[in-house]
Image (cartoon, rainbow, N blue to C red):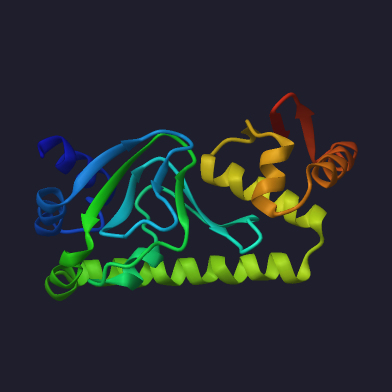
């Protein structure tokens, strides 16, 4: 438990009280999750709130036709509001939580959500802050789909990914971009080549470098 407590304290020492950190460490479990691994899969019964201590994950929604759409990313210190909204009721997840990088994730039992909410004001603030952030990202995703052309969506997607990973060198294939944006690889490749001509990025084998 001591290692878990140190990880939680490292992430939240300026946000949570020692009592709350102790409660999270005593009741939660820290998982080592590898890049590409599902933290929670669509259809799983959600019994825990996943909180990212180190690393990055993405929340992916699959539509009825099987197309996948990235809703948003989670990074150090963030949690998914989809889990918060379930509270004490165990329901099936409607999204996939996928590790974007090797990560350490705190899994905290949803059944204890009311205890934290009632006893720790800083936890209530943390939950509200996450709700607000996710709502802004959700609206931005809607704007991307409804109002922006595909080249803008691709470039914004790459910029956001670069920001989340803190790296302008992205190891990603054209097919992976197409999957995440629900379009075709041919379209992605054509638009990326145009962006390269415009000096926005440079293309390499399974790698894109943003300028």
Q: Is residue 26 left or right of residue 100?
A: left
Residue 30: in sight, yes or no? yes
Residue 76 is situated, as x and y percent measured from the top left of the image, at 38, 47
Number of numbered labels in the structure image: 0
Q: Residue, x 47% and y 66% (percent of image)?
A: 134
Q: Residue, x 41% and y 40% (percent of image)?
A: 55
Q: Quadrant of residue 112?
A: bottom left
Q: Is residue 82 left or right of residue 19?
A: right
Decide: is 140 above or below 43.
below
Image quadrant containing the C terminus: top right
Q: Is residue 38 left or right of residue 65?
A: left
Residue 70 is situated, as x and y percent measured from the top left of the image, at 58, 55
Q: Nearer the viewer, residue 162 or 30?
A: 30
Q: Residue, x 14% and y 48% (percent of image)?
A: 25
Residue that lies at the very extreme toward the top in this rendered image = 205
Q: Is residue 10 left or right of residue 27?
A: right
Q: Residue, x 12% and y 53% (percent of image)?
A: 27
Residue 172 is situated, as x and y percent measured from the top left of the image, at 65, 34
Residue 211: in sight, yes or no? no
Q: Quadrant of residue 1?
A: top left
Residue 111 is situated, as x and y percent measured from the top left of the image, at 18, 66
Q: Nearer the viewer, residue 168 or 178?
A: 178
Residue that lies at the very extreme toward the bottom in this rendered image = 118
Decide: is 164 above or below 172.
below
């Amino acid at each position: 438990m001591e290692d878990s407590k140190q990880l939680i304290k490292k992430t939240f020492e300026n946000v949570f009280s020692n009592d709350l950190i102790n409660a999270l460490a005593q009741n939660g479990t820290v998982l080592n999750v590898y890049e590409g691994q599902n933290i929670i899969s669509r259809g799983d019964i959600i019994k825990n709130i996943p909180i990212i201590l180190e690393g990055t994950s993405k929340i992916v929604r699959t539509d009825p036709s099987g197309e996948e759409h990235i809703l948003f990313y989670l990074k150090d210190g963030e949690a998914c509001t989809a889990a918060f909204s379930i509270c004490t009721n165990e329901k099936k997840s409607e999204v996939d939580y996928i590790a974007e990088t090797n990560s350490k994730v705190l899994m905290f039992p949803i059944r204890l959500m009311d205890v934290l909410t009632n006893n720790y004001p800083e936890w209530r603030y943390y939950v509200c802050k996450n709700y607000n952030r996710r709502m802004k990202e959700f609206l931005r995703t809607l704007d991307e789909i409804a109002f922006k052309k595909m080249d803008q969506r691709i470039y914004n997607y790459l910029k956001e990914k670069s920001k989340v990973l803190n790296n302008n060198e992205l190891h990603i294939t054209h097919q992976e971009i197409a999957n995440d944006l629900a379009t075709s690889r041919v379209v992605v490749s054509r638009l990326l080549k145009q962006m390269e001509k415009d000096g926005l990025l440079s293309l390499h084998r399974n790698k894109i470098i943003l300028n």
